[in-house]
Image (cartoon, grey):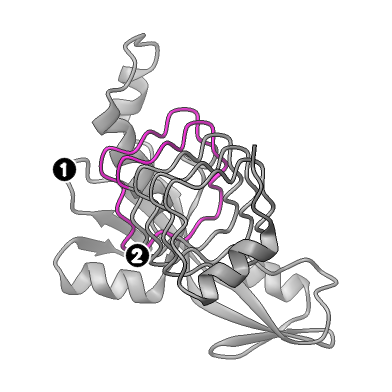
Amino acid sequence: MNDLTREDIEKGIKNKVSFEGANLKGIDLKSLDLSSGMFRNANFRYADLTNTNLSNADLSGASLRHAVLVNTNLSGADLTNADLTHADIRGAVMVGTRIDHAQVRGAKGVSEKVFFTQELLDELNESGKLQLEGETITILTKAKPRFSLQQAVRFTAMDSGEDTEKLVGKVKTLDDLKDLKAEIFPDSVVVKDAVYRVETGFIGLPIKEEQASREKGESRAKKDEELLAEFFLKNVK
């Protein structure tokens, strides 16, 4: 049984307490700053981590089965050997996240659209891992996934006002912002009387190759390494 509370975790992180092996099943940790937390082998089954900052956290070996990780910041986190079976990872930020040997079968969000920050595209380009053709990019890995790009912003936080439009954590295209009659600035967007901090980037729509149709109908299940490759490429932000 989980005897730890949300307040216990928040206070412990501030005091650099280790929660290695802790039972956090079903706990509500929405929107907390748990960056650099030590959660190795912890049990997060059914936990709600929506909008939580877990950047640079140690989640190696942790059980995140059925956990909600919608719009969670997992940048730089260590998910080595973690169990993400049936977790909801839609919108999760995963720049530099380690997912070696992680289990991702049934995870929601694996096949969602990708949000590429401008910073990530610059890093891929500088490292020679990006090929750009007009508004189409190819990630130069073994699978060489291709995406068509559409300029967009990701709403990360409120600077002032109330989030009446429920935009924090969401990605909106420039056309969407025009419909909202938003004022757009380099790192912020104003909607009505609310000021939001944003990341600029692009929505990437996967371009399906002919190979996909040839493979359709094959009954062979994907190997773990194929699932991991798909998981990383379609969730990298």
Query: Picture quarter containing residue 149?
Result: bottom left
The image position of residue 86, as x and y in percent, is 53, 32
Circle number at residue 142? 1
Crowding around mark 2 (Cα neighbors within 10 Å: few <14, some 14 to 19, many 20+) is some
Q: In the depicted view, which residue is nearer to us: 182 or 67?
A: 67
Placement of 54 over or under 146, stated as above or below: below
Placement of 118 over or under 227, stated as above or below: below
Circle number at residue 76? 2
Circle number at residue 84? none
Q: CA distance from mark 2 to mark 1?
A: 23 Å
Give the mark nearest the N terminus, 2 or 1.
2
Secondary element type, mark 2: loop
Quadrant showing the C terminus: bottom left
Crowding around mark 1 (Cα neighbors within 10 Å: few <14, some 14 to 19, many 20+) is few
Question: Which residue is pictured at 34% across the width and 48% down the height?
Answer: 60
Quadrant showing the N terminus: top right
Q: Amino acid at mark 1?
A: Lys
Question: Within the magenta stretch, is there residue 32?
Answer: no
Question: Within the magenta stretch, is there residue 105?
Answer: yes
Magenta span of residues: 80-107
Q: In the depicted view, which residue is nearer to us: 80 or 235?
A: 80
Q: Amino acid at mark 2?
A: Gly
The image position of residue 59, as x and y in percent, is 40, 52
